[in-house]
Amino acid sequence: MPAALPLDLPALLAARERIRDAILRTVQWQNDPLSDELGVPLRLKLENLQRTGSFKLRGATHKIGRLIAGAHPPTGVVAASAGNHAQGVARAAAQCGLRAVVFMPVNAPLTKVQSCRKLGADVRLVGETLEVATDEALKLAQAEGLTFLHPYDDWDVIAGQASCGLEMLEDAPDMTVAIVPLGGGGLISGIALALKLQNPAIRVIGVQTETVAPWRTYLRDGALEEVPPGAHTIADGIKVKRPGKLTRQVIARYVDEIVTVDDNAIAEAIVTLLERTRTIGEGAGVVGLAALMQKKIALCPDDRAVVVISGGNVDMTLVGRSIDYGLASSGRLMCVAVTISDAPGQLLAVLKTVADLGMNVRHVEHRRGELHVPVGMTEVILQMETRDFEHQEELRVHFAQQGLRVRNLLGS
């Protein structure tokens, strides 16, 4: 029989009391349109509305509070993070008057870097991965006698994150499934403990990105997958290649399933969340919603699911790209290249066809002199807003009837 874990339900409840005044009890919203689309009652735990825009504040606040209450309070703290843990540490340290140094990869989202600096942290950008930033943070901690705050592999941090799970069950006592983003494992460990220690029947499902998925086979064979060098994902908050040793213990015991989603699905989920809730979710924050939309998780009609939207600190440039992708993937954005005679009135005829079909033109571009465009012809690039894929097919049929050659520039 496996050894008992150091966190029991009283410990989790005590942790929640310690941080109650420093965090928000975030809304858990039942979204009827999404429930109807997915065929199951669905609630969204909106941690993107948490102070600092992420659940990470919970664990960082609890850890720093425990350190300060200890026999040897730290003179300062140091952390490594893609951004959300760094912001949590920066705010929690500032509330206590502690010096905070945070190491972040050089490609960390600008919004997260700026937020950390506004919170008073000494931000240092090093390397291209979280692992490099962690190594540098550990070196500084040793050199200057600072206390290193691990983002997930720490029982105090896990206990702080568990407060999210306690709220989830209190707000939805009939829940049967919890769907949680999975990076290093701190959030899902805390939530799994909070739920399973009260109702072992609740299914806890972790969601990773397809390209950075060290946990993919863990529940099956106990081994972590090696993540290829240079693996990229827009879900930077869960781009973790070194999962924790403590979190492995909890996940092995209390997590029921692990699935993955790709960046395209994540981009669609960002748009869906924005449309349905008018709130922003970052890539890592919406992977659970993406998994449901992609039908990666089997749900029964009588299930009651809660999906954790773990953070909303997304780079605005990524939001714009994600919106365009989401529109294109749902048939609401179309971009084609049409070859027409380079003569007066030809473009007008093309645009009249578009207008007659009720499409809105976002962008028009001419290309002359290209090697693939015959002499005496011109290629017109049209980007249009459409209703759906059937609407787009209507345009292709009309162009074909007019003898025009058309190339689709967005997908098949």
Image (tube, rainbow, N blue to C red):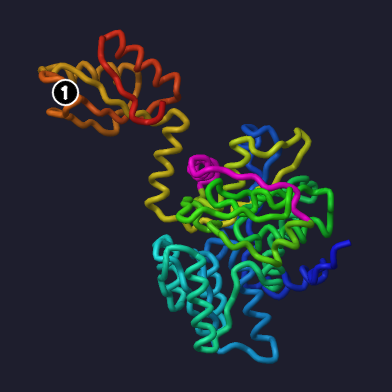
**Residue 261 x/y as whole percent:** 57, 43
Residue at point 26% right, 33% down?
A: 363
Left or right of 390? Residue 239 is right
Q: Quadrant of residue 222?
A: bottom right
Q: Main secondary structure of the magenta part?
A: helix
**Residue 378 x/y as whole percent:** 16, 23
Q: Nearer the viewer, residue 80 or 163?
A: 80
Q: Is residue 111 above or below residue 89?
A: above
Q: Examine the rendering and report whether any part of residue 162 can be seen.
A: yes
The single residue placed furthest to the top in the displayed view is: 401
Q: Is residue 355 above or below residue 234?
A: above
Q: Nearer the viewer, residue 230 or 94?
A: 230
Residue that numbered label 1 is attached to: 378
Left or right of 210? Residue 71 is right
Q: Is residue 358 above or below residue 205?
A: above
Q: Nearer the viewer, residue 229 or 284?
A: 229
Range covered by the magenta-colored residues: 254-278
**Residue 401 x/y as whole percent:** 30, 8
Element on which disc 1 rests: strand
Residue at point 20% right, 25% down?
A: 372
Q: Examine the rendering and report whether any part of residue 97 can be seen.
A: no
Left or right of 332? Residue 370 is left
Let me know if residue 387 is in the magenta part.
Answer: no
Let me know if residue 259 is in the magenta part.
Answer: yes
The single residue placed furthest to the right in the displayed view is: 1
**Three-letter code for the amino acid on which mark 1 is drawn:** Thr
User: Which quadrant is home to the C terminus?
Assistant: top left
